[in-house]
Image (cartoon, rainbow, N blue to C red):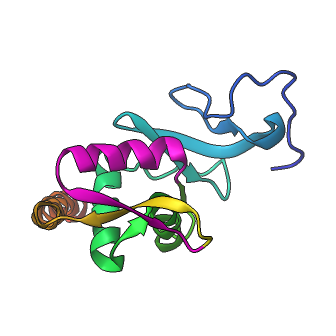
Amino acid sequence: MAAPYELRTPTRMEPIPLVAARFALGAGGRLEGVDSLPVGRRNMELLADNTSEPKTDVPYGTLDLLILKTLDTMGPMHGYRIARRIEQVAENLVRLNQGSIYPALVRLEEQGWIRTQWGLSETKRKVKFYSLTKAGGKQLSVAVANWERATALVARFLEAQS
């Protein structure tokens, strides 16, 4: 992107609510090249290397699967650390903010798939640690199986010759 465009009076620091939005308000009201995809009641932003290229959609429910898998692999973690781990594994193609990760964590806890416990972070701050429950482990297995079936189905269509 050439020079960043300044907005005169930004009202919010969140993605612009357009169906085909390719820009969002960033720090200082600058437009940044991102796409915002609705994921349930939250947004996940796909970062763009080049805003002229099409982006890959993040399917509905993917964030729950990513959180459950992260907790299964890494063990108990606090919300900020979960978000950063997902971004790291996704090689920073996805940016999760508090407005996306915490509602998902609350919902997963309400469903009984994760539990919380207060503890101290690496910086000695009091934070909630999230861990996978036995029911969450079973749900993860179901979600992975569903994901594999869905991707196999799509792969069959993509590989099929006319």
Whole-percent x and y of residue 100? 46, 44
Q: Is residue 30 above or below residue 156?
A: above
> Is residue 32 shown left or right of residue 87?
right
Q: Nearer the viewer, residue 162 or 152?
A: 152
- Residue 20 in the image, given as x and y percentages of width and height: 54, 31
The quadrant in which residue 10 appears is top right
Q: Is residue 36 left or right of residue 3?
A: left
Q: Quadrant of residue 147?
A: bottom left
Q: Which residues are magenta?
A: 96-122
Q: Along the horizontal axis of the image, is 93 left or right of 62?
A: right
x 9%, y 65%: residue:
138
**Quarter holding residue 154:** bottom left
Query: Is residue 127 in the magenta section?
Result: no
x 45%, y 53%: residue: 56
Seen at 44% across and 49% down, the residue is 101
In percent of width and height, residue 160 lies at 18, 62
Above-or-below relation of 84 to 100: below
Residue 108 position within the rendered picture, expressed as x and y whole percent measured from the top left: 26, 49
Q: Is residue 70 above or below residue 58?
A: below
Q: Nearer the viewer, residue 154 or 70?
A: 70
72 left or right, relative to 1 = left
Q: Which of 28/53 is in front? A: 28
Q: Residue at x 27, y 73 (%)?
A: 72
- In the rendered view of the protein, which quadrant contains the C terminus? bottom left
- Tell me, yes or no, whether the highlighted magenta stretch contains residue 107: yes
**Front position in the image: 75 or 31:** 75
Rendered position, 11 above or below 114: above
